[in-house]
Amino acid sequence: MLFSSPFFLFLFFPLAALAVLAAPLRARNAVLLAFSALFYFWGEPRFFFLALASSLADYLIGARLHDARGSPGAKRWLILGVTLNLALLGCFKYLDFFIDSLNRLLVPLGGPAAGLLYLALPIGVSYIVFEKISYLADIARGRAAPARRLHDYLLYVFLFPKLLAGPIVKYHDFEPQLRDRRVNVEDLAAGFSRFLLGLAKKVLIADTMGEMTGQVFGLPPAQLGFANAWLGLACFTVQIYFDFSGYSDMAIGLARMFGFRLMENFNLPYVAQSFTEFWRRWHISLSTWIREYLYLPLGGSQGSAARTARNLWICFLLSGLWHGAQWTFVLWGAYHGLMLAADKLFWLKASARLPACVRTAVTLLLVMLGWVIFRSSSLEQMAAYFAALFSPGREGSLFLVTRDIWLALGVGVVLSLAPALAAPLRPHPLLRSAMIGTAPWAVAAIALLALGKTVTVTFQPFLYFRF
């Protein structure tokens, strides 16, 4: 059930909002849990009961873990809980990947070929597992107590606004909101506006960019030219940002209308002046989760520069694998880990004297080259795409680039780089006041356009649903 689908917009969400807001305060968690369970069961009925059983195991393990704190048994309970969750993720997401990789290695040497299982990837499983691990880790560290009631913990796992693609919520941040929250008119208005903003980013910009991205990345290598390769890459750079940040806006807005405050997930990442800054602005909930539950336990930046670089590389190699079970994602993670290590070792100091616009341009170009790895379906396609990008004069298939694509691309670029573009302009105070005064009307008009598009065109799934 997609947030941008007419069924969700005009039936499921209004019913859920009315039911939750009309319920007594003590019953709101239970009512919201019922709608969240229905939301997930609707989209993933086969996996729902497995996820429910896994959550029940976490709830029981968490209680035992809390009781055993300070004793050797606590570590065993934590290892058991984390292992069960990683086994769930590994079975559905990585088992066929490892079997296929093993076949590619052994079959040419005369070894037998193992059969693939073709297990369907349950939507949202990567996010669910990371949140469930944070619950156990927070109890082990004493940062949070176990959920007092099972349905409170289940609401943490299944809360539908953030269920499918985050933001990833750490239990110690979420737990206080389970016990004490209120919804007022300001929350409803701010949440609804944020939801509409995300909807507009998704259907007006990301989906429009997706049309051109799909055509270019779907070309055979022989038909891929220099110009259309760069056009496709520019479109994908805008698409993935507005698609994923649009989903995050919608999730944050929906959650706020129910009284929950989810962490921000994006903060204009394309204005970053280094990869270190990029990951403080891009998918913030993932990067902070990795820092807290993986990077710091590995030793963080304590020790030599080489050890810090190693820790960063390990974290982002695993981050790439988390994004998907194929070698392009592993390579993308290794690429970002390498760039972050370079920041630590020399680039941040070496680039300090460069103008800010140059640092932003260099970082954005390198991020875009990373998107080639991310978007390619195979290492062979990736190599062919890079060859086209760096072959000036190479001709390829011609596309009819319609005005709506140029418009969406232009608007996407301006909005992505607004602070960097506006910094030298310093608009007059009267102009700023006029812009602020017309903003609500502009938002309303854009929201109407977005809602109109959702009922007139076939909706497209969010890119991060496959992760």
Image (cartoon, grey):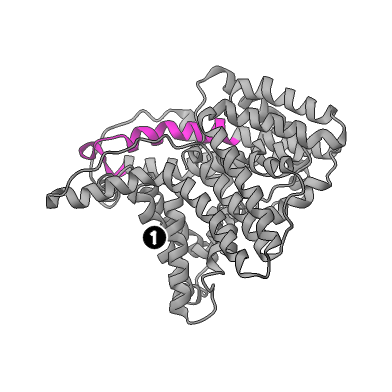
* 215, 80: nearer the viewer: 80
Q: Quadrant of residue 43?
A: top right
Q: Residue at x 79, y 30 (%)?
A: 20
How many numbered circles are shown?
A: 1
Q: Which residues are magenta?
A: 201-227
Q: Position of residue 175 (x, y in %)?
A: 74, 51
Quarter of the image with the N terminus is top right
Residue with the mark numbered 1:
335
* 55, 98: nearer the viewer: 55
Q: Is residue 58 visible?
A: yes
Q: Quadrant of residue 192?
A: top right
Q: Position of residue 296 (x, y in %)?
A: 56, 69
Q: Residue at x 56, y 54 (%)?
A: 81
Q: Position of residue 122 (x, y in %)?
A: 49, 36
Query: Compared with residue 398, is residue 91 higher up or lower down, i.e. above or below?
Result: below
In the displayed structure image, the side of residue 288 where residue 370 appears, left or right: left
Q: Secondary structure at mark 1?
A: helix
Query: Compared with residue 242, is residue 43 higher up or lower down, i.e. above or below?
Result: above
Q: Amino acid at mark 1?
A: Tyr
User: Residue 99 lies in magenta, yes or no?
Assistant: no
Question: Which residue ends up furthest to the left in the rendered image?
Answer: 110
User: Residue 223 lies in magenta, yes or no?
Assistant: yes
* 192, 354: nearer the viewer: 192
Question: Which residue ends up furthest to the bottom in the rendered image?
Answer: 304
Q: Is residue 417 visible?
A: no
In the displayed structure image, the side of residue 211 where residue 247 appears, left or right: right
